[in-house]
Amino acid sequence: MTDRALLTAEALRFAYPEGRFVAHVPRFRLDRGERVACVGSSGAGKTTLLHLLTGVLRADSGRIELNGARLTDLDEESRRALRIRTVGMVFQQFALLDYLCVLDNILLPYLVSEALDLDATVRERARSLAEATGIEALLDRKPGQLSQGERQRVALCRALVTEPPLVLADEPTGNLDATRTDAAMDLLFEVCARHGSTLLVVTHDTRLLERFDRVLQLEECMQVTR
Amino acid sequence: MRGLLHMAGAHARHHRWRSLLLTFCLTVAFLLPATTRQLMTRYERDLSARADTTPLVAGTRGNRFDLTLGALYFRQSALEPVHMGLLEQIQDRGRGVAVPLHTGHLTREATLVGTSLEYYERRGLRAVTGSLPMMIGDALLGSAVAARLGLGPGDGLNSDPTNLYDINQPGATRLSVCGVLAPTATPDDDAVFVDIKTAWMVSGLVHGHGDVTSPGALEEDMILSRGEDSLSVSPALIEHDQVSEENLWDFHLHASPEELPLTAILYFPADDKDATILKAEFNRSAVHQMVGPRKVVDELLNYAFKIKRLLDGVALVLIISTLTFGGLVLSLTARLRKEEFDMLHAIGCSRSATWKLVALELAGIVTLAAAGAAVGLILLITLAPDLIRVF
């Protein structure tokens, strides 16, 4: 792996326990600061690809290097520890916790991991992110009191609060109308650019693709046998 | 861990009704066995302590529980009274100390206990204000009665009439409060003590009235008949209802002293031999019995322990069902929170952290329930003393 490469994967194989879905990733690479889109239809395995590349799912064989660490050689707890420091995730449904206020949702990685220290600097960073995304007045509210757009911004802040080198977004605009989709993508690009984070977005929305440095077809990245 | 604790607290607060319901169920499950245990400990301690300080109780043959509880706790008993002659027989042996007890009357809902000065000595009772009853008509109040009635030395109180609708029965007797006992946390706190003669006065067996024998002392229509050495007068003759220095010597007895009734006799033997001999003599009698309160109380406690075992069983079932219910709730919660946990695992949270999250919430609820049970127990003890007071 060269210095530019943030994530590389080679000859990955993975099968769900039922054996009805077998995935093969011959080669995959993300460079630092890149903005990459991966396009595929619904149910084609986009989420599986993201989970494989970040070690949420353990590949049956093959090799992954993430930010200089050999992910495929690590046990589950080590993979989690690496992931929480290195990867920020934006989920399709935002996956905010309804019982926590907005600020706590942003700080979630620090609340659940003893490997990360929640100090005044981190709190200040969370507030800065909230300010940058225009939700600084909502920090005490619960997700149930927010609009879709506001919820998406909270999810984005949560993904970025650890200042991860890699941000993965799984259909981040799937629930938004066209106007809000553009705004959300503007925000995602802007914040990732400000933090120098690599961005990988999986989506089936082809309208967004022009904005990315590279666009990959899911079928080219991952071959699936059902 | 602080972050997880914060999240567990936030989750419990967010689902406050579920958390409260679980806490309430667990509180009840903890409180029930704790209360029965506390009650049993107190019953055992109080019953045993009272019994241990009363070596022997003599009374009419019959239910030994009635006799013991009547003599130790002043419970009204259906047993026939023994007579003063029996007490004199025991005293004539010249060994231990026999103490008379008469508990047949009430005053302001407190048992009026007629006894002798030896009772206070043997029970270690002392007047915190005033003095022990030295004169007929004096009343010594237990501390709880004095507090309840707000009375002290120099005040008066009436005995409860035995029957309001029968003028042949003695009416209320005015008693003079001579002192208040120091608190003892025993049934003595809830009783009013008088001299044994005062108890008989309240019964109407000792009474006082003005001169009726001197010529001209009474109008002729008040005299029903004259004997050689006796005089029958009309019930219309008004008797003294209160003892004073002026009328003290008017009080007299219209029966043989040996036949005056006693509820029971407490006996403090000189030694084990004295106790054994006296018990043997009594137990040969077809009319009287003498029991060792400790043995009777132990029998009573055995019954109570059987009930406690039953209650413990019920409590165990309650705890198991509550834990099962709690487990079901948690299992459903874990299922409902699967998406949340999957998300947490995806961002890098360890599985142990998610288990800790659930465990901390449960621990919080259990801790709250235990604290609630402790507070409940203290409130029960403090605010409902009747529940935990022995008889």
Image: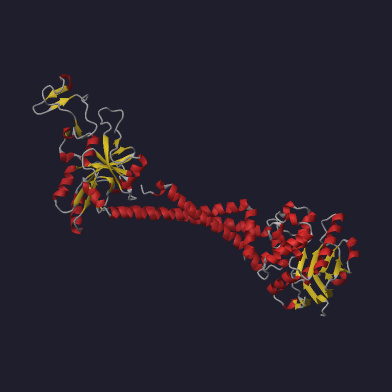
In front: B239, or B84? B239
Residue A139 place in picture, x, y as percent: 72, 56
Q: Is residue A50 above or below residue B254?
A: below
Residue placed farthest to the bottom in the image?
A2
In front: B313, or A198? A198
Residue B342 place in picture, x, y as percent: 71, 64
Q: Is residue A55 above or below residue A152?
A: below
Is any atom of residue B19 visible in this view? yes
Position of the N terminus of chain B, as image quadrant, is bottom right
Residue A104 place in picture, x, y as percent: 69, 60
**Residue A118 appears left or right of A31:** left
Residue placed farthest to the left in the image?
B228
In front: A139, or B208? A139
**Residue A121 lies in what quarter of the image?**
bottom right
Q: Is residue B258 above or below residue B55?
A: above
Is any atom of residue B299 visible in this view? no
**Residue B260 appears left or right of A202:** left
Residue in view at x 21 percent, y 49 percent: B118
